[in-house]
Image (tube, grey):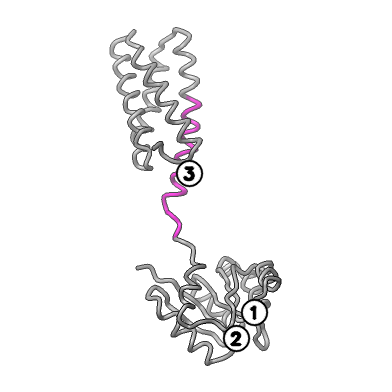
């Protein structure tokens, strides 16, 4: 289970104690508390919490001023901040969000539901494959353009071995990578084209299978590029 680190900042010891007990109802939460904005700046930089629950009204460095300093430090700039305040009318909430807060939890809060309220602000973990898949789709678009140009050469009636070899190499690469990123039909179409190109290189003139397989792969590649997801 992934641990979610929550830093709670409030100058009232009783509130800090209640919040710690309340958040303890969610086994995924690990909580630390601070009694001032100044202390929170140091702990946030060192501990790197996943979220900060920040009281608005505090002596010295209040919540909004603390948020400003958090955003000015590159180490803490990206940490989501949720304000906790009795000033939770729509106008105030809009103001706090305009300062860069991710949301507002109203005081007084229900200790039994606080953990669920905080949990609603926790973003799902980013899929580590997402960026790799996006890069693969960019490559698919480039390969589609290459295959489309080679198809024009073949349609002119010329079947130069160099063109067939380039088609085979592109198909081979897409066949190997497509399945890894969830594009099984694209991978299968690429494997079919690779086999057809190899057969035609071995037996010149057997181009019908290559033409059909090339059209099929370009169709799947264009569809995947447009939707960003495998065909159903």
Please report the bounds of the magenta region as a residue range: 125-146
Q: Is residue 92 left or right of residue 7?
A: right
**Quadrant (top left/top right/bottom left/bottom right) for the N terminus:** bottom left
Mark 3 to mark 2: distance in Å? 43 Å
* Viewer-nearest residue: 10 or 76: 10
The image quarter in which residue 90 lies: bottom right
Look at the numbered disc 2 and give the secondary structure of its residue.
Answer: loop
**Quadrant (top left/top right/bottom left/bottom right) for the C terminus:** top left
Tell me which residue sits at (46%, 17%) in the image. Answer: 151
The residue carrying mark 2 is 36
Tell me which residue sits at (37%, 21%) in the image. Answer: 213
Q: Which mark is residue 63?
A: 1
**Mark 3 surroundings within 10 Å by alpha-carbon count, few (fewer than 14), some (14 through 19), many (20 or more):** some
Q: Is residue 158 left or right of residue 205?
A: right
Q: Main secondary structure of the magenta part?
A: helix
**Mark 2 surroundings within 10 Å by alpha-carbon count, few (fewer than 14), some (14 through 19), many (20 or more):** many
Mark 1 to mark 3: distance in Å? 38 Å
Magenta stretch: includes residue 53: no
Query: Residue 84 appears at what percent x and percent y?
Result: 59, 79
The residue carrying mark 3 is 134
Magenta stretch: includes residue 136: yes
Query: Residue 81 appears at what percent x and percent y?
Result: 58, 72
């Amino acid at each position: 289970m992934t641990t979610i680190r929550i830093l709670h900042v409030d100058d009232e010891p009783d509130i800090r104690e209640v919040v710690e007990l309340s958040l303890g109802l969610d086994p995924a939460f690990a909580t630390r508390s601070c009694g001032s904005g100044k202390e929170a700046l140091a702990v946030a930089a060192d501990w790197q919490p996943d979220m900060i629950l920040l009281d608005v009204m505090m002596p010295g460095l209040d919540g909004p001023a603390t948020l400003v300093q958090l955003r000015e430090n590159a180490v803490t700039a990206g940490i989501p901040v949720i304000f906790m305040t009795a000033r939770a009318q729509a106008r105030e909430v809009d103001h706090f969000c305009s300062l860069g807060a991710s949301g507002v939890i109203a005081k007084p809060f229900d200790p039994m539901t606080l953990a669920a309220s905080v949990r609603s602000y926790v973003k799902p973990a980013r899929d580590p494959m997402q960026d790799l898949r996006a890069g693969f789709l960019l490559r698919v678009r480039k390969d589609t353009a290459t295959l489309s140009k080679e198809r024009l050469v073949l349609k002119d009636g010329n079947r130069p071995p160099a063109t067939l070899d380039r088609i085979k190499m592109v198909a081979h690469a897409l066949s190997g990578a497509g399945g890894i990123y969830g594009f099984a039909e694209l991978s299968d179409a690429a494997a079919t084209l690779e086999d057809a190109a190899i057969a035609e290189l071995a037996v010149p003139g057997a181009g019908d299978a290559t033409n059909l397989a090339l059209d099929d792969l370009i169709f799947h590649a264009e569809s995947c590029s447009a939707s960003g997801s495998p065909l159903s």
